[in-house]
Image (tube, rainbow, N blue to C red):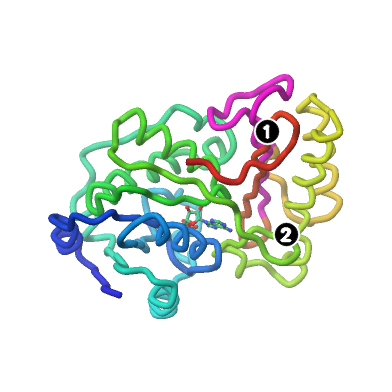
C-alpha cells in the first residue's frame, strides 16, 4: 500500500493511471463500516484509494473537531490488511492553504435532520468532497447509508454539478446488539454503550409499525420517541420520517422513506436510520 500525504503527489499519481479507481473517503479511526466500503470498492475497480481527513470545515465551533478520535498508525495497518492500494492522508494546511475565497452552499435536503442541527455541516462536506473528487478522480465513490443525509447531499452534488463519478450507498454495519458502528462510539460510557442499542431497536419498532400498516408518520415517530426516551439517558435531538432521497416531509407513507434519529449522549452524538420502501422492507444499497 502506498501512503501519499501531499495533494500534488496524489494528483500526479492518478494523472495517467488508466485504471478504474474506487474511492472511499473517511475521517479515519477505521472500523468494520469503513472496511465494508473498501471490500465493495475492491470488487468493482482496479485500484482502491482511501482518504483519511478530519475536515475542519464540516465541524461547528462547539463540535468535536479537536477531540475526534485519530489513530493514523493503526488505520494504515488496517487499510493495508484490507487491500487499500493508496492511502491518502492530506494535512489541513495542504487541503486549505489559503483562506477559502469560495463558499459552497447546499440548500436541497439540508433543512431537516443533521442539516438543521448542524448548520453549515453539509456545506463543509460538499466542499471537501469536491476537492477530493478533483484530486483523486474516482470512477466510483463509496458511502455508508448510516450517513444517509450525507449520501443524499453528495448525490445532489454529483448529479447537479455533473461530476464524472458514480456514487454507491452501502448498508450500515452494526455491532452484535444493533448499534451502528461509529468512530464516536468510543466516547460512550459503559452505561451509555448499553443504552445506545435503543436507537436501532427504536428504528426497528418504527419499521414494524409500517409493516403492520401504519401510514401516519406522526404515530410512528411518537412510538419511536417513547421507546428511545424510556431506554436511554441520551437527549433526543431529532426523530424524523421523511421521503428518501429527497428528504421532504410527508403526511402518509406511500413511497420510499427514511426513519432517522440523532441522540446526544454526554460525550458523543449518535445518528442512525433505516431506509424503507412503502411496505416497510429495508433498502440497504443504493447505486
Ligand atoms: P466517517 O469516517 O465517519 O466520515 O465515515 C466514512 C464513510 O464510512 C462514510 O461514507 C460513512 O457513511 C461510512 N460509515 C461510517 N460508519 C459506517 C457503518 N457503521 N456502516 C457503514 N458505513 C459506515
Say which residue appears at 79% left-offset and 52% top-offset: 201
Quadrant of image for the N terminus: bottom left
Q: Is residue 261 found inside the magenta-colored segment of the image?
A: yes
Judge: label 2 CB < 8 Å from ligand 1: no
Q: Is residue 250 found inside the magenta-colored segment of the image?
A: yes
- Of residues 79 and 57, the one nearer the viewer is 79
Q: What percent of the width, then of the height, locates residue 242?
A: 64, 30
- Of residues 124 and 148, the one nearer the viewer is 148
In the image, residue 244 above or below residue 92: above
Q: Residues within 10 Å of mark 1 (few under 14, many from 20)?
A: some
Q: Which residue is mark 1?
A: 277
- Of residues 162 and 219, the one nearer the viewer is 162
Query: Which residues make up the magenta segment?
Result: 240-264
Say which residue appears at 84% left-offset and 47% top-offset: 227
Q: Residues within 10 Å of mark 2 (few under 14, many from 20)?
A: some
In the drawing, what numbered circle is on residue 178?
A: 2
Say which residue appears at 55% left-offset and 47% top-offset: 145
Q: What percent of the width, then of the height, locates residue 13?
A: 17, 62
In the drawing, what numbered circle is on residue 263?
A: none
Residue 249: quadrant of the picture: top right
- Of residues 222 and 277, the one nearer the viewer is 277
* Kind of element beneath mark 1: loop
Amino acid at each position: 500500500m502506498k501512503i501519499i500525504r501531499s495533494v500534488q503527489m496524489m494528483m500526479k499519481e492518478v494523472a495517467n493511471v488508466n485504471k478504474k479507481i474506487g474511492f472511499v473517503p473517511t475521517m479515519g479511526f477505521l472500523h468494520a463500516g469503513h472496511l465494508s466500503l473498501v471490500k465493495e470498492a475492491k470488487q468493482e475497480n482496479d485500484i482502491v484509494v482511501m482518504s483519511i481527513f478530519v475536515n475542519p470545515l464540516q465541524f461547528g465551533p462547539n463540535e468535536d473537531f479537536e477531540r475526534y478520535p485519530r489513530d493514523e498508525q493503526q488505520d494504515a495497518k488496517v487499510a493495508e490488511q484490507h487491500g487499500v492500494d493508496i492511502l491518502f492522508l492530506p494535512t489541513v494546511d495542504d487541503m486549505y492553504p489559503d483562506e477559502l475565497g469560495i463558499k459552497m452552499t447546499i440548500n436541497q435536503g439540508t433543512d431537516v435532520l443533521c442539516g438543521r442541527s448542524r448548520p453549515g455541516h453539509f456545506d463543509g462536506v460538499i466542499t471537501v468532497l469536491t476537492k477530493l473528487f478533483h484530486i483523486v478522480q474516482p470512477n466510483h465513490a463509496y458511502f455508508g447509508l448510516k450517513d444517509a443525509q450525507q449520501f443524499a447531499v453528495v448525490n445532489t452534488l454529483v448529479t447537479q454539478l455533473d461530476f464524472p463519478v458514480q456514487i454507491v450507498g452501502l448498508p450500515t454495519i452494526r455491532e452484535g446488539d444493533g448499534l451502528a458502528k461509529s468512530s464516536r462510539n468510543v466516547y460512550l460510557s459503559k452505561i451509555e454503550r448499553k443504552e445506545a442499542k435503543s436507537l436501532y431497536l427504536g428504528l426497528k419498532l418504527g419499521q414494524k409499525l409500517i409493516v403492520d400498516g401504519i401510514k401516519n408518520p406522526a404515530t410512528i415517530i411518537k412510538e419511536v420517541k417513547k421507546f428511545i426516551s424510556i431506554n436511554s439517558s441520551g437527549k433526543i435531538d431529532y426523530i424524523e420520517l421523511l421521503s428518501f432521497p429527497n428528504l421532504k416531509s410527508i403526511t402518509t407513507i406511500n413511497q420510499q422513506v427514511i426513519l432517522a434519529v440523532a441522540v446526544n449522549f454526554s460525550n458523543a452524538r449518535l445518528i442512525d436510520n433505516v431506509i424503507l420502501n412503502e411496505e416497510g422492507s429495508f433498502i440497504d444499497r443504493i447505486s
